[in-house]
Structures are given as C-alpha cells and as structure tokens.
Image (spheres, grey):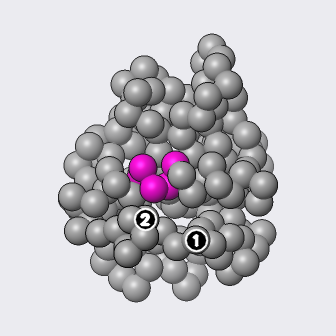
Amino acid sequence: MDGAVIIPATKRHRRVLRALFELYAHDFSPMTGADVDEHGAFTDSDFPLIWWRSRGDTFHPFLLAVQGVWAGFAFVGEGSYIRPNEDRHWLMEEFFILRKYRRRGLGAWFATQLFDRFPGVWEVGEIHENTDAQAFWRKVIGRYTGGRFEEVIVNNERWDGTVQRFRTLDSRLLSHEA
C-alpha cells in the first residue's frame, strides 16, 4: 500500500494510541452506549499503560501511518474468544481505521500484514451490533484464506458476539508439509 507504514507501538506512543482510541470509542458509542467521563474522555488518563502492565508480552499494539500521518491502530493479543480457558491463538482485539482512510483497501492491507506477522490460528471477534465490522472481516478473511474460515456466535465469559477463526496462510502451508 503506497505510503502506508505499520509501526509496532511502544510506551512512547501512548498519547497517540490514547487519542486514536478516543475516536474509536466515539465511533462505537452508539453500539455500546458508552459515555465520556467527567473529563470528556472515554478512557482514563493511564490508558493504554494498564494494558501493557496487565498483559505484558501478550499485548502487541501497532500504529498505522499513511504519508507520515496517523491513520489507525490495531491491538493483537493472545488467547481465545471461543475457548478462553483452552486455546492460545492470536486475537485481533481492537482494530481501527480513521474514517478519512476507510474504503480504500488500507484496512484490508493492514489486517493481512498483521496476520502474516503472527502465523498460526487467529480469531477475530465483532460485537453483535457492529454489522459493518462483521461484513468487513468476512470479506477480508474470506479473501485472505480463500474462504477457509469458520464463523461462530460466541457467548461466554470472554466474548459475546461473532467470531471468525482461521489459520494464516504460512501456518496452513507448514501443516501440509509436515
């Protein structure tokens, strides 16, 4: 994708991540019913430091820049939405593209680049109300896997919503060679 760069986020990117997450939370507020706090923010002042502290090595934040301008972020995690106590897979925990950059193929490119960086089994979950995200992920994952993914509705202690589960191309090729 011309001019697009994926940057592994560090704690020095905290202010950027928080600012972008505020926009993300605003976009979600009609679906989640979330309101801002007394300071006018959806997140608290130490966001996302609490994620780094509580999740450690299982928290992988990324920033997306286009032509040197911030355009989105993604938080890749480890675990499972479908079987929270059993499986350890890659999770697309949060994914956001600024409205200005949507519908240009940038989100699909960003997502597939992250899938390739973390080979193995992936789960991507969407809340029930977010039908646009469900359509986006079905399309992106369907193209990426050649239609080889499963979709399940989950309602457990970890997740309540739709989940697409698939293997990355690299891990699928490796499993056929073994």
Residue 149, relative to residue 53: is it above or below? above
Q: Check disc 1 and give the amino acid type.
A: Ser
- Which residue is denoted by mark 2 in the rendering? 41
Which corner quadrant of the image does residue 33 belong to?
A: bottom left
Instruction: Give residue 35's quadrant in the image.
Output: bottom left
- Of all residues shown, which one is farthest toward the top? 2
Bounds of the magenta segment: 20-24
In this view of the protein, which residue sits in the foreground, 12 or 123?
12
Query: Residue 75 in the image: x percent, y percent?
Result: 59, 56
In the shown orientation, is residue 70 left or right of residue 143?
Answer: right
Residue 158 lies left or right of residue 65; in this view the side is left
Which one is in front, 165 or 49?
49
- Disc 2 is placed on an element classified as loop
Horizontal placement of 77 versus 80: left or right?
A: right
Tell me the quadrant of the picture where the N terminus can be found: top right
Which one is nearer the viewer's eye here, 99 or 55?
99
Q: Position of residue 150 (x, y in %)?
A: 39, 53
> Are the residues tagged 2 and 1 within 8 Å (C-beta)?
yes
Q: Which residue is mark 1?
A: 45
Q: Residue at x 21, y 58 (%)?
A: 30
Q: Which residue reaches farthest front?
A: 39
Q: Three-letter amino acid code at disc 2?
A: Ala
Q: Which secondary structure class fits the magenta region best?
A: helix
Report which quarter residue 57 is drawn in: bottom right
Asked which secondary structure carries label 1, the reply is loop
List x then y, in percent, for residue 155.
31, 77
How dense is the environment of label 1, judged by Cα within 10 Å: few (below 14), some, or many (20 and up)? Answer: few
